[in-house]
Image (spheres, grey):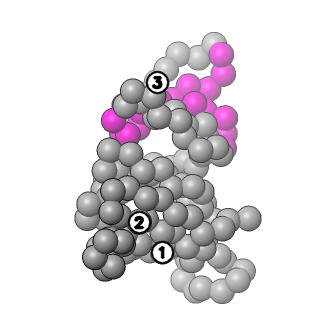
Amino acid sequence: KFINNLSLSNNNLFFLNNYGSLYSVNIKQMKINWFMNLNRSSGLNQNNLFLGGQILNYNNIIIVNTNNNTYGIDARNGSILYKKNFSYIARPIIVNNFVFLVTQNKYLIISLNTICKYACHGANEKFKCI
């Protein structure tokens, strides 16, 4: 079950609701910087509510997990930097500019500076560029 999600960075609050709308709000000036809708369904009702995960906000990039995709969004202007065809199952971990994600298919995704670079599945596989 998805519940609305918040993330705070400097004076900007990022809010993702269960209809798939992502807002950036300047809390100091009390104004909306930008907003976007990540829900691609045609109608909004309780049967097709948006399924998303926690917002990760790092280095002016917001990583948002949706039903089937992971988005990298520029926190300053809301532009989509990338859209990847996977969804992660646990909150990502950030260590020294590397982001580690585990997908629904049990792939380990390692990214440098929040742009997806490598994937590994199982102990015997080598890392592959994605």
In magenta, the rendered stretch is 104-123
Q: What residue type is labelled 1?
A: Ser
Picture coordinates of residue 39, whole percent (x, y): 52, 72
Location of residue 116 (image quadrant) = top left
Up-down relation of residue 26 to residue 9 (above or below):
below
| Mark number, residue 13 | 2
C-alpha distance separating marks 2 and 1:
13 Å
**Residue tagged by mark 3?**
128
- Disc 3 is placed on an element classified as strand
The residue drawn where x is 53% and y is 16% is 126
**Residue tagged by mark 1?**
21
Up-down relation of residue 60 to residue 130 (above or below):
below
CA neighbours of label 3 inside 10 A, class few (<14), some (14 to 19), many (20+): few
Picture coordinates of residue 87, whole percent (x, y): 58, 49
Location of residue 92 (image quadrant) = top right
Say if residue 109 shows up in the picture: no
The residue drawn where x is 31% and y is 80% is 31
Q: In this view, does 57 lie to the left or right of 20?
A: left
Q: Indicate yes or no whether the magenta region holds residue 72.
A: no
